[in-house]
Structures are given as C-alpha cells and as structure tokens.
Image: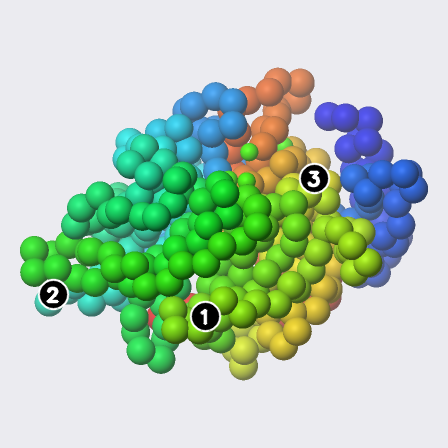
Amino acid sequence: MSILKNSLFIAGILGTISCNTTPQTQTSVNENSTNEKTFHTVNATIQTTPVSSDDDAADDPSIWIHPENRENSILITTNKKNGVDLYDLNGNLLNSQPFGKLNNIDVRYNFVLGDDTIDIAAASNRTTNSISIFKIDADSRKLKDISARVFPTDLEEVYGFCLYKDVSTYRFYANVVSKEGKFEQFELLSTDSGKIDLKSVRRFDLSSQAEGMVADDELGNLFIAEENVGLWKYNAHPDSGVSRTLIDTLHGKNKNNSLAEDLEGVSIYYAADKKGYLIVSSQGNNSYAVYDRNGDNKYIGSFEIANGNIDGTEDTDGLDVINMGFGSLFPNGFFIAQDGANTEQNDTLNQNFKLVPWESIASELNLIQDKDHNVRL
Ligand code: CA
Ligand code: CA
Ligand code: CA
Ligand code: CA
Ligand code: CA
C-alpha cells in the first residue's frame, strides 16, 4: 500500500466517522497533481478468487442474473490471457473456460434462437481478432460457444466490446472498437443450425484508443470511453450515423479534474422511469465517476474502493453494476470492479474482482436504490 493510498484510507475513515453522508471535499491533496484527490470511499465485502494467470490478466466482469434462483447468478469475467472465469456471488471460482484471449465481455437476455429463447454472453476475442458469442447455460453455469464462424471485421485489432439490445425491435447488436479507435457494429442473426451469425451494419472512427463501452437498451444510447480524451455518447441504433456528444473530458477548458487518464470500463445502473446512473473507471486516480443516466448525463461525483477488510482497487479496467437484489448477500444489488493490484497483507496476489454493495455507494453519493426494476428483459 502506498503512503498516498494509506493517507487517503485514513482520511476516508475519518470522513466516514465525522460526516457519513456529506461528500468529502474534492480539492487536490497536491495542487500539482490531478492524481492525488480524495473521493467518497466505500469498501468491498466480497472478492473473487485470484485469476490463474499472472501480471495484467483479469479484465472485464459482467453480471448474469439466473432466471429462477437469483442466488445462483454468476459473474462472467475475462482472463484476457486465457478465456473466461465464472464465479458465484461469493467470489468462488465455478469454471474456467479457455476460449482464447477474450478482452471485454457483455451479457443480454432472451435472444430468440430457433425454437429456443436463450441468454447470451459475447466478447472481443484477440486470438481470432473477432467476436465470440456464447449461450449461457443456467444448469451447468457454463458458456457454450455458438458463434457461426470466425466473423471477419474491418478492425486491425479488436479491443473494447459491448452488446446492445434494441428493446423496441428486439434486435441485438455487437459493438466492437479497436486499439486504433475504429468502431464497428454488427447485428446478431440466428442461423438454421442453432448458431449466431453477425452482419456488419455500421462503421465509424474515433481519433485514438478506446475500450470501455456500454449501451443503454432502454434509452438507445451508446457510451464510448476514448481513453485519453473523454466520454462520448452516440445513438446506439445502426441507422443513426456518427453524430455524438462529449459528455466529459480529460483535457481542455471543460476538463473534469476528478478524472485521470485512462478512462476505462463503463456500465449502467438501471432504475425505473428512465432513472439511473452511468459509471466510468477513471484509471489514473483509482476512482469511479458517476453521471446521470438520463438527459445531459450530468456529473454527480466520484468514489473509490478503499482498503478495508478487503484491499481496495487500483488501475481498474472493466466494471459492472446491477440494481436487482441477490438475497442476503446483496439485497440491493452491487458494483463489481477489476482490481489491477490485488494484495493481502504484504503479499501481492494475481489480479481479481472486488464487489461492493450498492447501498454503500448510494448512501455515500446520495443515489437512488431500485431493486425492483427488472433488467432481465
Ligand atoms: Ca490492466
Ligand atoms: Ca484500456
Ligand atoms: Ca487492490
Ligand atoms: Ca481492458
Ligand atoms: Ca485481496
């Protein structure tokens, strides 16, 4: 633990004791550095078993909600050197499946495949420079590759990835962005042989490397974090062209001093009546920025996962969040983030993922909790 991290941790404890729901001032500890800021602090209550590969290996988590027994839901995460690791909600490893160098992964529900309706996960696959599509099997809690082929893309090196389900048409789209910042969107199509094929439907370019992406299925927005530039909002629909809005930025006169490059993983907390939040990893200062999901996506505040019984997070790549409840473990949903530096006492272990109850974050930043809004659509 660095001295800075230590002092922030102590500051966080003091802040919690003295003013539990009052935002801590977001002034720089050191005026010369945008990396040294104090944020709202929360603690993880669960962490996953460390990933089997060393160095930078764990990358992107995605939460899948079991259709019948909520407590059998799983964390579908990428080991970008090997494939997927699937964990239960206590963080225990259920299965590792070697599908190649899967980078980012996302989940959607109720894809109609022939006579079946299935839940799917899909990922950017850097072994094949393509996209892998999986059926999520609720009984075995494993993935089955149902990609119809190795899909050709126009991208030199697939990197960021997310799914989009247009809830007005029930069409599904795969969105992929490359290391050079080139974006391509595909529609998912079922084949006669019970697999899923892809058809390219849109292309556009950003100016530099981007990875974190998320689509808002209900509002039709697509958010892309251009790592050293800022957070963009596009229309998620393939016919909507290339118009976009810069929601927040790392540089220039509208620079948000709470952000530090790289901007990485992005996810959405859904609530009823189009409410909710957009959460982005600000990797350079180990924090997470929270925005309104709706309207102009106003910046609300930032938090960090500090050291507690479980170590805090550093250099987070991917993240995810869920509003629905999961029994006594997470009655109001949870937030999950990759931890780039997983430690235990003085030992450095392989990377893992940290889970934080949503109510911890909601009470710190005065956010709503909506465990009843069904996102298993
Ligand atoms: Ca990393
Ligand atoms: Ca990245
Ligand atoms: Ca850590
Ligand atoms: Ca990553
Ligand atoms: Ca740990």
At horizontal 51% and vertical 33% (from top left) the residue drawn is 352
From the top left corner, tell me how far across and down residue 176 is, in percent. Answer: 41, 51
Give the distance between the C-alpha atoms of the residues marked 2 and 1, in whole angstroms.
31 Å
- Where residue 91 sits, quadrant-wise, is top left
| Sequence-first disc among 3 and 1 | 1
SS for dot 2: loop
Apparent side of residue 294 relative to residue 148 in the rendered image (left or right): right
Q: Quadrant of residue 110?
A: bottom left
Pointer 3: what residue?
284
Q: Which residue is mark 1?
A: 241
Residue name at image x 25 percent, y 65 percent: 111
Q: Is mark 3 within 8 Å of ligand 2?
A: no
Q: Which residue is mark 2?
A: 114
Tell me residue 142's x, y (percent): 26, 43
- Between disc 3 and disc 2, the foreground one is 3
Q: Amino acid at mark 3?
A: Gly
Q: CA distance from mark 3 to mark 2?
A: 46 Å
Q: Quadrant of ligand 2?
A: top right
Nearer-N-terminus badge (2/1): 2
| Mark 2: amino acid | Gly
Nearer the camera: disc 3 or disc 1: 1
In the picture, measured across the screen, residue 6 lies left or right of residue 203, that is right
Question: Residue at the location (29% across, 56% down)?
Answer: 120
Element type where label 1 sits in the image: loop
Mark 2: C-beta under 8 Å from nearest atom of ligand 4: no
Q: Secondary structure at mark 3?
A: helix
* Gap between marks 3 and 1 measured at Cα: 32 Å
